[in-house]
Every structure is written in C-alpha cells, then in structure tokens.
Amino acid sequence: MKRNDILLLISILLLAVLSFTAYRFLNRKPGDVVQITVDSKVVKTLPLDTDVSYTVRTANQGENIIRIKKGTACVSEANCPDKLCVHQKKISKQGENIICLPHKLVISVLSSKKSVLDDVAQ
C-alpha cells in the first residue's frame, strides 16, 4: 500500500463516520414527555405541550426548578454550587438530557408512544 492508498482509505472512513453522525443528529424525533429522575427513581413525568414549572427537592437540601415552555424543557434555577444544569441548553428531542450531578437529577425527553420497531429497524 502506498501513501495515496492510505489517504484514500482514511478519507473514506472519515466520510462514513461523519455521515453516520450527521444522520443520527439530524434525524432525531421530537419527544412529547419529560421524565424527571432523582437518584435513579422516577419522580415525575410531565408533558412537553403544557407550559409549567415544577420544583424538585432532593434529600440533601437540593432544589431545582424545571420549566417547560413552548415544547422545550430547561432548569431555570438551582441551588447547586456550580449551576451547570442551569446553563445547559433547552431540550425537546428524544434522547436529550439535562443532568445535575450534585443533586443526582436527570431530566430526559422521551416519547410516550410505544414503538414496535427498535431504533435499528426504524
């Protein structure tokens, strides 16, 4: 194998990886519910089509205010030390998450519709 053969092989592999990544990110479906989990226990499931604020209190005096507005969810306020969860972007598509590690809080966008097909078959 010569230098040009190796460059061609690398460029084909790079193009394949970029195409797969673009397909996965551009083909995400919007979710319709937000699942709030604290310490691996589901606390609340809220619909994304209703504007609401929900306060989550954790065992270690943690408090996060989750705001759902116009089909997106975000953490509007938190009393954690770093406030990284407040600075994360709004989520609305299936598989997106907001995580607050100090409070062990996970906010996930899901679909309430059960699909017969898995992700590979779709």
Image: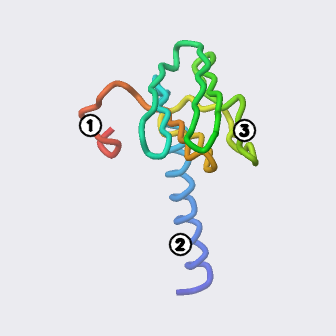
Residue sitting farthest toward the top = 50
Above or below for 30 versus 52: below
Q: Position of residue 103 (x, y in %)?
A: 60, 45
Mark 2 and mark 1: span between their CA atoms? 34 Å
Q: Which mark is residue 92?
A: none
Question: Which numbered mark, 2 or 1, is in the foreground of this view?
Answer: 1
Q: Quadrant of the C terminus?
A: top left
Q: Which mark is residue 9?
A: 2
| For marks 2 and 1 on the same chain, the one whose residue lies earlier in the sequence | 2
Residue nearest the observer in this picture, 61 or 106: 61
Left/right placement of residue 87 relative to residue 3 reads: right
Q: Which mark is residue 117?
A: 1
Residue nearest the observer in this picture, 87 or 30: 87
**What residue appears at the point 74 percent right and 43 percent down from the top-left corner?**
83
The part of the image, by quadrant, that contains residue 121 is top left
Residue nearest the observer in this picture, 12 or 64: 64
| For marks 2 and 3 on the same chain, the one whose residue lies earlier in the sequence | 2
**What residue appears at the point 71 percent right and 28 percent down from the top-left corner?**
76
Question: Which numbered mark, 2 or 3, is in the foreground of this view?
Answer: 3
The amino acid at mark 1 is Leu
**What residue appears at the point 50 percent right and 41 percent down from the top-left corner?**
38
Instruction: Describe the element under mark 1 as helix, strand or loop.
Output: loop
Q: Position of residue 59 (x, y in %)?
A: 55, 41
Residue underneath mark 3? 79
